[in-house]
Image (spheres, rainbow, N blue to C red):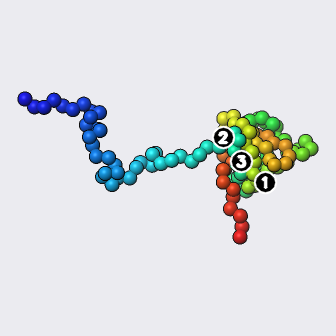
Amino acid sequence: PPPPAQPAAVAWASAPSRAATGASAPAAAKAAPRRITPGDFAYHVNPQGQPGHVRDAPGPGGAVLDEPLPGAEQLAHGQRLRVTSLSGHWAKVTPDAGIGGWIPVEHLQLTPLPTAV
């Protein structure tokens, strides 16, 4: 009589590994970039290189805090900020000096911008 068929899990486990065959790992297996979390220092990056506006609440409905509150400021492109909390696609940030507020997470990166030489 023929030998019993191996279960699929055993057949898969007995297949040669990617390392043994020289195949590269799929792109999904590569390490994902680290996400911004509360407590991080991050850098403001506006796609147009313009100053950014902080808001009093997350989302486009939040009032812009740049004017007329004393101490409020626009965020400079490349400015270092402390992330204090997250809400969806928005981060509450505090600059080294001045009043903080909410900006889109996509306007932050963990590494400083390169400096001109």
- Circle 3 or circle 1, nearest the eye: 3
Residue depicted at 41% across the width and 48% down the height: 26
Q: Within 10 angstroms of label 1, few (less than 14), some, or many (20 or more) residues? A: some
Residue tagged 3: 41
Q: Estimate the spatial distance between the alpha carbons at disc 3 and disc 1, rounded to whole Å.
A: 15 Å
Of mark 3 and mark 1, the one earlier in the sequence is 3
- Residue at 69 percent across and 56 percent down: it is 112
* Label 2, residues with CA under 10 Å away: few <14, some 14-19, many ≥20: some
Q: Is residue 94 left or right of residue 70?
A: left
Residue that numbered label 1 is attached to: 76
The quadrant of the rendering that contains the C terminus is bottom right
The residue sitting at 18% across, 31% down in the picture is 5
Q: For the residues marked 1 and 2, what is the alpha-carbon distance in whole angstroms?
A: 21 Å
The residue identified by callout 2 is 37
If the image is split into quadrants, where does the N terminus sit? top left
What percent of the width, then of the height, locates residue 95?
A: 80, 47
Question: Which amino acid type is shown beneath numbered disc 3?
Answer: Phe
Earlier sequence position, callout 1 versus callout 2: 2
Residue in view at x 33 percent, y 54 percent? 22
